[in-house]
Image (tube, rainbow, N blue to C red):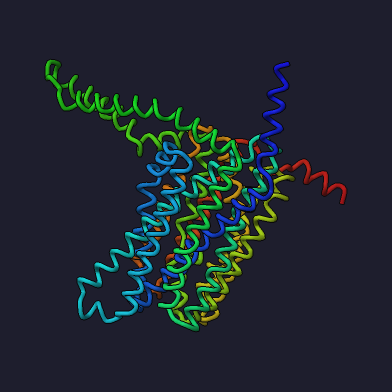
Amino acid sequence: MDSQPLLGDQKQRLQSSPSSLLTYLYSAHFLARWGARVWEFSVGLYMISIWPDSLLLAAIYGAMESASVAFFGPIIGRWVDRLTYVKVLQLWLVTQNLSFVIAGGAVMALLVFSSLKFTNFVAFIFLVILTNISGAVGVLSTLAGTILIEREWVVVISEGHPPGLLTRINSIIRRIDLTCKLGAPVITGFIISFVSLKASAMALAIWITISVWVEYWLFMSVYNGIPALGERSLRRISEVSPNDVEVDTSASQETSNLLSNDGSESSATTGKNSVTKIIEWLSKVSYVDAWIVYLQQDVVLPGVALALLYFTVLSFGTLMTATLEWEGVPVFVIGIARGISALIGIAATVVYPMLQSRISTLRTGLWSVWSQWIWLLVCVASIWVQNSQLSAYTLMGGVAASRLGLWMFDLSVIQQMQDHVPESDRCVVGGVQNSLQSTLDLMAYVMGIIISNPKDFWKLNLMSFATVTLAAFLYTIYMYRIRKHLFHFEKLSSLVQCL
């Protein structure tokens, strides 16, 4: 008799994710990612135009953006974990879009008043700082949205369904992101090449102002249409709140004890106790506690391997885009090349589910990361190509081809985290993972600041390739620890015998 309600609940859950609501989710994700991808592509071009013949401003902006996520990523993860889904959604959309509008306005002012750095250097520095801060806030808001949708909603929606649904939703979400990476640079590149940089900044501001309302309506339609999201949101808050109170109380008590040491014990004992209390207090700080949770996960090594891939200039990011323009590659060509790169990434989202269903998530990651490494050898070879234009096109070709392995590896690691990280730690681990990725991204931009001459881009090329090599070996070690082997040599030998 008790089984009837359970069967009824399961049936209701299975019917709670109709295709129309998933379409709303995909549409809202597209609108949100489009604006972010347009800004990501454009900002490097804005910076190289504001300060020609130097990667300095582009590198400073990238460093500022990455540093903000590296430092605040774990805190953002905790924050998402402590608020309701609706509150996170509202803060994410308002903060992200407002920040990008302000940054776009500051860039327009710098472009319109191009002589400002000579006539009023204080105003020039103010606008550059405003652009950097607004962009960083926008990226932090985007991180909150990424954790909410990709680490929480996707998992909740797929619960109670066949395992293949999670793989399919993950692939479509990543495909949408890469589609924006494909379309946004192409359209923006044509606007910049055939109209102006100012027109592209204005178009971005208009797009963001209009799309935010549609995004909110679509996301809320999904939230209201899938009861499991509301139930999970309330359960998370009820579970988190008592722990927060307990942690905050104990942390404040320990802080008071540290400040009010009565000195009755010996100095050696007092010093030892103080150090112990400081360590215990630090472990309860949100930032430190989040890292402790992350390091305790079984999938920490794949996470580190994925993060290492962010210490690179071998992508169509700010530094490589600025370098290509400095070498004389037309902006619309860069946009098309980046679009082709994204198209290959989209192909990865199609290939991944097929490969994953045949050789497992774990083994798919191994083949993917080494596939990326092989194609990046082309980028290394471009260093020795004498013709600068041919070298640039060889570099773009190698980077574009490597995206197949990169995005398949990304999907593999994300799904392993979704499968093996406990529900209570999911947002925190997602925040720390993004923080770690941004830390490595920050290091790449710091190297761009140190090696700011575009002529020395080859040095950044080699360092990036070395980091990818390290990531591939780390994941291979993890694979061997789990499976105790890398290849089925007995199957290979039987196949050879058959031949």
Residue drawn at (55%, 80%) of the image: 390
Q: Is residue 267 left or right of residue 8?
A: left
Is residue 34 at least partly visible in the picture?
Answer: yes
Is 104 drawn above or below residue 217 in the view shown?
A: below
* x and y, in percent, of residue 215 in the image: 52, 55
* Quadrant (top left/top right/bottom left/bottom right) for the N terminus: top right
Q: Is residue 165 left or right of residue 52?
A: right
Quarter of image, res 96: bottom left
Is 484 drawn above or below residue 322 in the view shown?
A: above
Is 154 drawn above or below residue 65 in the view shown?
A: above
Outermost residue on the left side: it is 263
Residue drawn at (64%, 53%) of the image: 23
Is 365 drawn above or below residue 298 in the view shown?
A: below
Q: Is residue 351 left or right of residue 299?
A: right
Residue drawn at (59%, 38%) of the image: 156
Residue drawn at (41%, 39%) of the image: 78
* x and y, in percent, of residue 358 in the image: 74, 45
* x and y, in percent, of residue 375 in the image: 60, 63
* x and y, in percent, of residue 304 in the image: 48, 45
Q: Nearer the viewer, residue 150 or 62?
A: 150
Q: Is residue 17 left or right of residue 385?
A: right
Quarter of image, res 209: bottom left
Is residue 56 at least partly visible in the picture?
Answer: no
- Tally the numbered discs: 0
Quarter of image, res 457: bottom left
